[in-house]
Image (cartoon, rainbow, N blue to C red):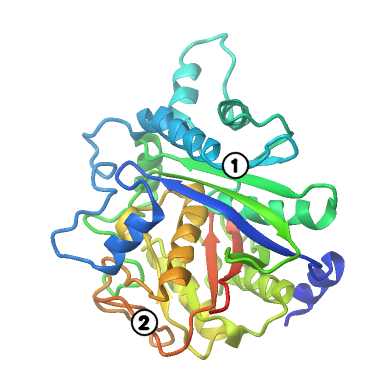
Amino acid sequence: MSTQAQAFTSRLGRPSQTVVIRGLGIWTPRYRSAAEIFTTMATPKSEITPSYAAASNPDAPDGAELWPDALAAISHGVKGWDIDLSDCPLVFASAKGDIRRTLRTLDQPGGAIPNLADDARRVALLCGFSTPVICLSTACVSSLAALCEAQLILATQPDTPRVAVITADLASNFVMDGFRSLRATAADLCRPFDACRAGLAVGTGAAWAFLERSRAKTNSMEIIGWGMGNDATHLTAPDPMGGGLRSAIEQALAVAGIPAADIDVLFAHGTGTPFNDAMEARVFAKLFPHRPPLTAAKGLLGHSLGASGLLELALAAEILQHRLIPPIFGLRTTDYPGLNPVCSQALRPDRPIRTILKTASGFGGVNAAVIVRGPAR
């Protein structure tokens, strides 16, 4: 364990109670549940079209028109759970929010410019929250950072029994143009960790979760470790050596109180860009010499920016439930000998799947890591 991770753990202290994800839901324009996405990933067919195809088409309508659909899905999902919202703080996370509305307002001189805080309040009103709303935006790490913030609230505020995390980000021409200017987009498929990977594809997604303390054992997925790190190497490129990601993972392992060898599955950020995949591969190979199976979801779903972390964590819950690791869509041949990526077909390993590490990385060098554990069987 690094000195930084030890200092982080000593300041925070080991959690005295289990934190479980009591409710978890997702929405994308094509898929309405994590189970549906998991089934598609676990039984890949050559005729499957990635859900980001329309967003990657420059002639398609601006994906931000889907914002009302995303909000309706979030509101319906949250209200469908029998959870008292009167004492439940909300952490809203997004990289861009309804960016089209913001740009449209900029063309109207004198008008108030909407921001992510407005989106957060709108979500809270639609869902029925009456508690304080925290708005968090840390690029593509946003929703995992929101989970870390929720964990911190539960660890330091004993009178707060639960916290809600809601996230949404949408593909738009504005976002696509930005990534194209960086030459970071794929011409056809996004191929995470593939030798021929050429870039990412932007997707659309939303997710919501309730985190709750629990003294008793449950059948829910537990969050046992979490951490964040920032290498601040470059505005858009990651630290090639992965200093920020390594720090985040080491903090998560320290909070969980487990060795790296206890991680059964790596669920990578996996953008399909040469720089990000190489950085993740270097860190994973260094910290996990036992080479646990590696999977990723952006080859099928595209990169839903700040929402991607929580959306993909919902897929981690499916892995824990089914004891099955789906392959990386778009991956044919990897060039990372230190990794053990799941290719071509789903894997049911001999070793029981109990603990999964989910990572995320974003612009500015920010990184996050969350470790989840499923119930013993």
Q: Residue at x 24, y 38 (%)?
A: 58
User: x and y percent of residue 15 in the render?
Assistant: 79, 67
Amino acid of disc 2 = Arg
User: x and y percent of residue 49 in the render?
Assistant: 20, 54
Residue 97 can be seen, yes or no: no
**Residue 1 versus residue 256 in the image, above or below:** below
Badge 1: few (under 14), some or many (20 or more) residues near its Cα, within 10 Å? few
**Residue 63 versus residue 28 in the image, above or below:** above
Instruction: Say the numbered circle drawn on residue 348.
Output: 2
Q: Are marks 2 and 1 in contact (CB under 8 Å)?
A: no
Which of discs 2 and 1 lies nearer the camera? The answer is: 1
How many numbered circles does the render carry? 2
The one of 363 and 371 positioned closer to us in this rendering: 371
User: x and y percent of residue 357 in the render?
Assistant: 55, 71
Instruction: Say the numbered circle drawn on residue 265.
Output: none
Between the C-alphas of marks 2 and 1, the distance is 34 Å
Q: Residue furthest left?
A: 47
Q: Is residue 179 left or right of residue 156?
A: left
**Secondary element at tag 1:** loop
Amino acid of disc 1 = Asp
Residue 349 can be seen, yes or no: yes
Give the labeled residue for mark 1. 82
Q: Is residue 60 left or right of residue 160?
A: left
**Secondary element at tag 2:** loop
Quadrant in the rendering for residue 61: top left
Q: Is residue 38 left or right of residue 361?
A: left
Q: Residue at x 26, y 79 (%)?
A: 333
User: x and y percent of residue 96 in the render?
Assistant: 51, 38
